[in-house]
């Protein structure tokens, strides 16, 4: 499927006023997406664990709008309060998707959204938020008696979510989602995320992710700016090649249950992501001193015990601590006693791998 396959050809049936709700999760990349081209297309393939407890719930209420020219009218609320800060991003999203969903212009909307994680936690709500909204819109499209398979529904939801926020396209399904064309993964594409269908050893079932909230503040440099700085970056070409190789290696790791190799790839990916930021022009650092203290504690714990604990990072200071389910008790004890002190207000969130978004 390419872009043109998502442009509908027939007429839509008019929907009366109504509403639809979805709960959509966050995701954490193991091989990172950093660098894009065109309309939110990735420079390299990525793969992520879909999360479970960190999610956004969105209710989209819609009503036919008599004046269908110009800007799409909508209101947005976060936890019941008007959230005007979100308006520009959503307005841009509507603008971008209008060609693939011409009916969006004919309605007015009320978007009510809430996150399971605190708003100012430093956890990006764009992946879960944009995927939840894309799914609600797809449900409208399905309600207009447009015949579609579940596969098409998920692919187009992911395609639309990508136009809102790149990594959001990996939040529709689970437990592992690939986004970006990779030679060894059939069906992989730059246009949307697809559920990883390769063999996954039981050691990776129900993997745990505890998110340590090191810095809940606003990031100094947005992902959009960071992605842009990969254009003309001295190491960009090597980095994009490396991501392809790391994804190939991870496929073997998932098949063989090689957790030691998993640790090497995942930690290296996290540090490479931040190395790209530190070697951009202008350069920037999103890790904080406590991020590094946590990494050192994790390494020390791994050396002292036979634990398979490891870390990954997203574009911020928070640390995702990854560990197999059979270590849940011991690692969570370690986190509570040794790592929570590095978190702002000792705040962290226990999460685990999940299966994707749900209609409510
Ligand atoms: O989806 P964006 O544009 O916010 O980019 C997210 C990029 C990383 O989180 C750093 C990596 C990834 O693959 O999710």
Image (tube, rainbow, N blue to C red):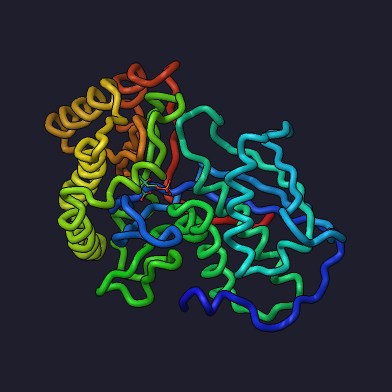
Q: For the point 21% across and 51% down, which residue is it?
A: 262
Residue 305 location (% of width, % of height): 16, 32
Nearer the observer, 357 or 97: 97
**Residue in front for this viewpoint, 12 or 216:** 12
**Residue 206, position in %: x, y?**
39, 51
At 59% from the left edge and 71% from the top edge, which residue is drawn? 153
- Which residue is the extreme one toward the left? 303
Does residue 259 lie above or below 329 as drawn?
A: below
Q: In the orientation shown, which residue stands out farthest toward the bottom?
A: 10
- Out of 223 and 266, give the one closest to the viewer: 223
Regarding residue 28, the answer to whether it shows in the image is: yes
Q: Could you say where residue 73 lies in the image, as x and y percent from the top left?
A: 76, 50
Q: Residue at x 45, y 25 (%)?
A: 216
Residue 213, above or below 46: above
Compared across the picture, whether 326 is left or right of 106 comes to: left
The percent position of residue 144, horizontal first and vertical second, equals 76, 73
Residue 308: in sight, yes or no?
no
Quadrant showing the C terminus: bottom right
Residue 287, picture quadrant: top left
* 176 sits to left or right of 276: right
**Rendered residue at 41%/38% (across/down):** 222
Q: Is residue 293 above or below residue 227?
A: above
* Total numbered labels: 0
């Amino acid at each position: 499927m390419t872009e043109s396959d998502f442009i509908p050809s027939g007429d839509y049936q008019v929907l009366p006023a109504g509403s639809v709700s979805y709960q959509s999760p966050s995701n954490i990349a193991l091989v990172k997406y950093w660098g894009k081209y065109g309309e939110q297309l990735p420079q390299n393939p990525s793969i992520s664990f879909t999360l479970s407890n960190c999610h956004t719930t969105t209710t989209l209420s819609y009503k036919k709008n008599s004046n269908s020219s110009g800007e799409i009218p909508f209101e947005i609320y976060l936890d019941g309060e008007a959230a005007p800060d979100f308006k520009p991003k959503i307005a841009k999203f509507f603008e971008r998707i209008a060609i693939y969903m011409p009916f969006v212009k004919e309605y007015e909307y009320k978007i009510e959204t809430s996150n399971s994680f605190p708003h100012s936690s430093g956890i990006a709500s764009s992946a879960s938020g944009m995927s939840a909204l894309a799914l609600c819109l797809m449900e409208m499209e399905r309600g207009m008696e447009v015949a579609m398979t579940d596969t098409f529904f998920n692919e187009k939801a992911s395609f639309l979510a990508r136009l809102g926020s790149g990594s959001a396209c990996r939040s529709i399904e689970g437990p592992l989602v690939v986004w970006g064309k990779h030679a060894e993964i059939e069906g992989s594409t730059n246009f949307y995320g697809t559920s990883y269908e390769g063999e996954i050893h039981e050691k990776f079932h129900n993997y745990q992710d505890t998110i340590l909230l090191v810095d809940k503040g606003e990031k100094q440099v947005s992902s959009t700016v960071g992605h842009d700085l990969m254009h003309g970056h001295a190491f960009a070409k090597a980095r994009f090649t490396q991501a392809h190789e790391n994804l190939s290696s991870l496929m073997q790791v998932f098949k063989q249950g090689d957790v030691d190799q998993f640790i090497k790839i995942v930690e290296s990916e996290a540090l490479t992501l931040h190395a790209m930021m530190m070697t951009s022009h202008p350069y920037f650092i999103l890790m904080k001193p406590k991020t590094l203290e946590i990494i050192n504690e994790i390494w020390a714990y791994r050396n002292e015990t036979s634990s398979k604990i490891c870390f990954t990072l997203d574009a911020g200071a928070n640390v995702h601590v990854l560990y197999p389910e059979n270590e849940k008790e011991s690692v969570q004890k370690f986190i509570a006693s040794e790592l929570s002190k590095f978190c702002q207000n000792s705040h962290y969130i226990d999460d685990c791998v999940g299966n994707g978004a749900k209609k409510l």
